[in-house]
Amino acid sequence: MLILSNIDRTFNKATVNEKKALVDISLRLDPGDFVTVIGGNGAGKSTLLNLIAGVHRCDRGSVALDGEDITHLPEYRRAKYLGRVFQDPMRGTAGDMNIDENLAMAKRRGSVRTLRWGISRAEREEYREKLGTLGLGLEDRLGTKVGLLSGGQRQALTLIMATLKKPKLLLLDEHTAALDPKTAEIVLRQTNEIVSGKGLTTLMVTHNMSHAIKYGNRIIMMNGGKILFDISGGEKKNLKVEDLLERFKVSQGQELDNDRMLLA
Amino acid sequence: MGDFFNLIRAWHGAVAEGIIWSVMTLGVYITFRILDFPDLSVDGSFVTGGAVAAMFVAYLNVNPFLALLASLAAGMLCGLITGFINTKMKIPGILSGIITMTALYSINFRIMNNSSTVALIGTNTVDVVVRDFFRGISAVNAQLIIGGVLALALIAFLYWFFGTELGSSIRATGNNPHMARSLGINTDSTVMVALMLSNGLVALSGGVFAHVQGSSSLSSGPGTIAIGLASVIIGEVVLGKKLGFILRLSAMVVGTVIYRLIFATVLFAGLKATDMKLISALVVCFALYLPTARKRFVSWQTRKRGRVPQLGLVPDAVMEDIIDGSDKDPDEPNLHD
Ligand SMILES: Nc1ncnc2c1ncn2[C@@H]1O[C@H](COP(=O)(O)OP(=O)(O)OP(=O)(O)O)[C@@H](O)[C@H]1O
Ligand SMILES: [Mg+2]
């Protein structure tokens, strides 16, 4: 269970470039919640995920995960609890290292790195099996450098890596945005299978409104560093894109600036 | 004819020295290629290694092997300092190295009892011990034995180390620090461990070099990094980068030996020993310029002929190797096959 309380985050404070990225954000995720996050450019979605992951610290407020206050824990120590997939396919994997080496590092997320050999034979079997479920043929290429994979393959691999050791919270920041539509669908479907299969608590940022509606049990819309609304349950199930646009208009008194958001 | 034999003799010595210096190149390889951190502190830690190894045998009468261990430890301390400046004080890598290097100049002078050279004539150095052990072998052959054993042991050690969990996390840190942190790797620590290992090897090399040369001197430091980089690049160009990890490490030894052979030949041809730093600088500069040169060349050719150029002069595979200085070549075989 994730609890964010009254979080503020301002970039470049007291300069002309001052930017309030998050303003008094409070949010509570129950175990098993699969929350999709939407919002225009600069709404603060990435900042929110980065704050939870410890990439940025908050100016005010606290982050608690399963009762532990992690507000001041450095990024590498929070990693123990978090699975993350990023928008940039390059970011989640080490391109110069093999597929199996990447997986082996992900499997050791949160444990002390010792002088034991970095990967065991038994592990390789496990990875082969896991990669097989993707249906991308990666199971026969364990010894291939990740740098040789396509963006979609890399994202699928990062997804497996993020969930290899069950995270308390899975953070997905537009992880299909850099992929072509067909590959994006495949990766999203895999995401959904893994999340529901393992019952993972998940925050998924997407710029695709219909994806945000189709997946998950809860949807959050952000704008100007605030959470505008938070819809779950039956209401979320019956939501339409038009409803979202309408609700945005009502709360903000203006049309949604949708240069990046996909409505359909 | 006498000249010819002199040249052969010079080459013989160059091979021996090259193998000893290759320990330093392996250290530079760790930072420059694996950690992606151009570490200039080696200009200082090479001398620190030499100074410690010299003082331990000359003044403390310590067993020469223990003296070399002390060099290794001193070098690791130097690396730790650079790592601390970089990761904890958030000073950029190049500057961190310069700071340590500068500070070490004064410290090395103090280690050497406030003098700029320490002579080791008539002291019990490693090569003396080895020559006693293998009765009657020449000084150069003793150097070959010392350097060869050390280089082989280190290649085996590094192969093992970079395959361990800790070693893998260092490689990940050099390759993608964001990913490393997101997987729970403390990148501050991995940077420090890698810098310690690197500077430890550089200092060890400096220690052995001081022993076999019979002196330790402050002036042996400046330019070490350029020599190391030149050796790394020569090794990669000669053996190619599409090799397994063991061979890539071995290429560092080959590269350093070739560097020393060039050095010996240049001296033989009448240039001064001090000219060699200019040559290393040019080698490094040219090698680092190649990727840009290639891009310019390609766009110039395309503009001129309106088609994709053929790189006729140099075989493509070799050209790829030379220009791909970034080590981000995904075609390289895997580390531990
Ligand atoms: N490191 C930073 N330094 C300064 N400003 C930043 C930084 N990161 C984000 N910002 C600013 O904070 C605001 C929120 O950015 P954020 O990246 O969280 O938006 P987002 O909702 O993820 O948008 P997008 O859909 O474009 O990814 C933006 O105005 C952005 O310019
Ligand atoms: Mg974003």
Image: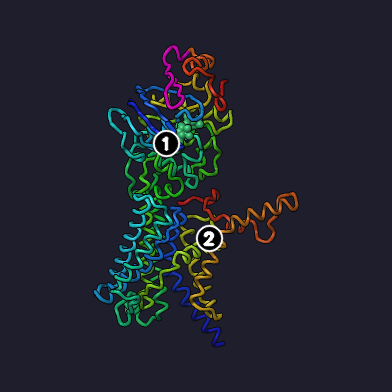
Q: Residue A235: which quarter of the image?
A: top left
Residue B314 visible = yes
Q: Which corner quadrant holds the N terminus of chain B?
A: bottom right
Q: Position of residue B5 (x, y in %)?
A: 53, 84
Up-down relation of residue B159 to residue B115 (above or below): above
Q: Main secondary structure of the magenta part?
A: strand
> Depth check: A50 or A87 in front?
A50
User: Mark 2 highlights which residue?
Assistant: B236
Q: Is residue A210 left or right of residue B145?
A: right
Whether label 2 touches label 1, CB < 8 Å: no
Residue A11, numbered label: 1
Q: Is mark 1 within 8 Å of ligand 1?
A: yes
**Residue at the image position 56 percent from the left and 30 percent from the top:** A183
Please give the range of residues in magenta.
A217-237
**Residue at the image position 37 percent from the left and 64 percent from the top:** B102
Residue B309, numbered label: none
**Residue at the image position 58 percent from the left and 28 percent from the top:** A181
> Depth check: A120 or B294 in front?
B294
Q: Position of residue B151 (x, y in %)?
A: 41, 65
Do tags 2 and 1 sit on the same chain? no
| Distance in Å between CA atoms under marks 2 and 1 | 44 Å
